[in-house]
Image (cartoon, rainbow, N blue to C red):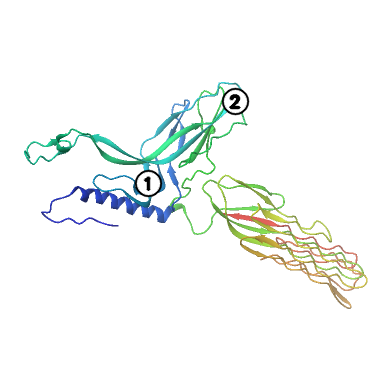
């Protein structure tokens, strides 16, 4: 941090004091940039109903960091300085806003609470100035002009509430965020309501609130959501989350059915893993492939939105009189991160009198089903089911059906 140097008996200058303040602001701005980056970040500013309740809300104390310049206008006798800087605006008191009800029954209104950094020069005062002709009688203002001069440059959070158009309840739209502002909250007010309650207030989906404080943080990710075939659906990105890690396994293929020769093994599903940028509040579709439902069927495909996908493994080939069944081909995968195809299923093996069906192929990090074993080609042994995510089932022997593949899996971490 830059510092001012003064000496004993030297005449103090106004720039000495102004320079100290500017240097501190620059140092704090770069510290904020190191920890928060240059995107706008908000802390505090909680939106709550008033007490007692009314048709008003209260926005509590808090802060905003926003990228701008050091001083767009002169700071006292220091000239303007347009070098870039992250600046911090602070509100130490609460601010209240009134909202109006729709006038038509059955309608509701969405109000948007938005915030921006605000810098203002304030507190005008007629300052005393040194009078060289009569030091005992100071001037009022420069040269005795009596002019008011601002004595503070304030940096605060500017807040406003923007009303949407009334519409039938459930059809009302939230106003768009103004340029240079960030959305913080949505306040939904239905016709006939007597006061605003907490249930009427929701966080705007892209509100840039600081979600975690340093004492709460731990290295890496510490939240996880896992999805199987029965829990697939939509995953909503939590507030404050802009990047997630997703791991996707496709379902395993089934083993081939035995005949006079044993069946081949089903293949493993593909695997995709990566870190992906997301938007708070968005809903990402999660599809999880089932393991192959029966002998000779293909495993289902899995996906995490359009960001990552993994195909299911192919089925093992049925045994047939002219030869043992071959293994299925592994499922492919796609995504911008790490991808790997599933392992192919194994081919059946006959070494009279012992018979081994084709083993199931594995998916990334997961082994496939082991071979079924018989003492004769017509021993009628059912193939082993795949258990691990994306594991292929092994083939059957004799008239035994092939084992089913293991189901896919999607894991999201943030």
Query: Tag 2, which secondary structure?
Result: strand
N-terminal of the two: label 2 or label 1?
1
Quarter of the image where one finds residue 387: bottom right
Which is nearer the eye, 108 or 197? 108
Spatial separation of the CA atoms under disc 2 and disc 1: 39 Å
Vertical arrangement, residue 300 with respect to residue 184, above or below? below
Of the 4 image quadrants, the one containing the C terminus is bottom right
The reply, left or right, for residue 180 in relation to residue 380 is left
Observer able to see residue 60: no
Vertical arrangement, residue 213 with respect to residue 190, above or below? below
The residue positioned 54% from the left and 57% from the top of the image is 221
Tag on residue 117?
Answer: none
What residue sits right under mark 1 in the picture?
88
The residue positioned 47% from the left and 38% from the top of the image is 114
* Label 2: few (<14), some (14–19) or many (≥20) C-alpha neighbours in 10 Å: many
The residue positioned 37% from the left and 43% from the top of the image is 89
What residue sits right under mark 2 in the picture?
107
The reply, left or right, for residue 92 in relation to residue 58 is left
Q: Position of residue 257 (x, y in %)?
A: 87, 64
The reply, left or right, for residue 245 in relation to residue 388 is left
The reply, left or right, for residue 151 in relation to residue 32 is left
Of the 4 image quadrants, the one containing the N terminus is bottom left
């Amino acid at each position: 941090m830059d510092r001012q140097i003064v000496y004993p008996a030297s005449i103090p200058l106004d720039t000495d004091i102004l320079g100290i303040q500017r240097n501190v602001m620059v140092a704090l701005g770069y510290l904020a940039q190191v920890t928060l980056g240059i995107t706008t970040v908000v802390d505090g500013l909680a939106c709550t109903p008033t007490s007692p309740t009314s048709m008003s809300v209260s926005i509590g104390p808090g802060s905003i960091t926003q990228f701008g310049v050091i001083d767009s206008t002169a700071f006292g006798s220091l000239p303007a300085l347009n070098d870039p800087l992250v600046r911090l605006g602070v509100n130490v008191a609460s601010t209240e806003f009134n909202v109006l009800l729709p006038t038509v029954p059955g309608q509701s209104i969405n109000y948007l609470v938005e915030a921006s950094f605000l810098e203002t020069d304030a507190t005008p005062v007629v300052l005393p100035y040194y009078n060289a002709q009569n030091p005992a009688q100071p001037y009022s203002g420069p040269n005795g002009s009596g002019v008011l001069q601002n004595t503070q440059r304030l940096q605060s959070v500017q807040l406003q509430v923007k009303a949407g158009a009334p519409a039938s309840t459930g059809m009302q739209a939230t106003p768009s965020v103004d340029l240079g502002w960030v959305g913080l909250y949505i306040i939904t007010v239905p016709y006939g309501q007597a006061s605003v309650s907490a249930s009427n207030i929701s966080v705007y989906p892209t509100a840039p609130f600081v979600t975690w404080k340093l004492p709460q943080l731990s290295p890496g990710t510490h939240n996880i959501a896992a999805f199987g075939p029965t829990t697939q659906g939509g995953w909503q990105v939590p507030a404050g989350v802009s990047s997630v890690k997703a791991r996707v396994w496709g379902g395993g293929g089934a083993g081939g059915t035995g005949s006079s020769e044993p069946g081949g093994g089903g293949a493993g599903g593909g695997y995709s893993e990566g870190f992906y940028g997301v938007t708070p509040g968005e809903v990402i579709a999660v599809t999880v492939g089932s393991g192959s439902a029966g002998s000779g069927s293909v495993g289902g495909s899995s996906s995490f939105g359009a960001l990552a996908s993994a195909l299911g493994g192919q089925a093992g080939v049925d045994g047939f009189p002219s030869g043992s069944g071959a293994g299925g081909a592994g499922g492919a995968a796609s995504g911008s991160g790490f991808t790997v195809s599933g392992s192919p299923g194994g081919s059946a093996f006959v070494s009279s009198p012992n018979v081994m069906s084709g083993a199931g192929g594995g998916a990334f990090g997961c082994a496939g089903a082991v071979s079924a074993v018989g003492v004769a080609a017509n021993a009628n042994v059912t193939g082993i089911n795949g258990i691990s995510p994306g594991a292929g089932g092994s083939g059957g022997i004799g008239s035994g059906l092939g084992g089913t593949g293991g189901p896919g899996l999607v894991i999201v971490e943030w």
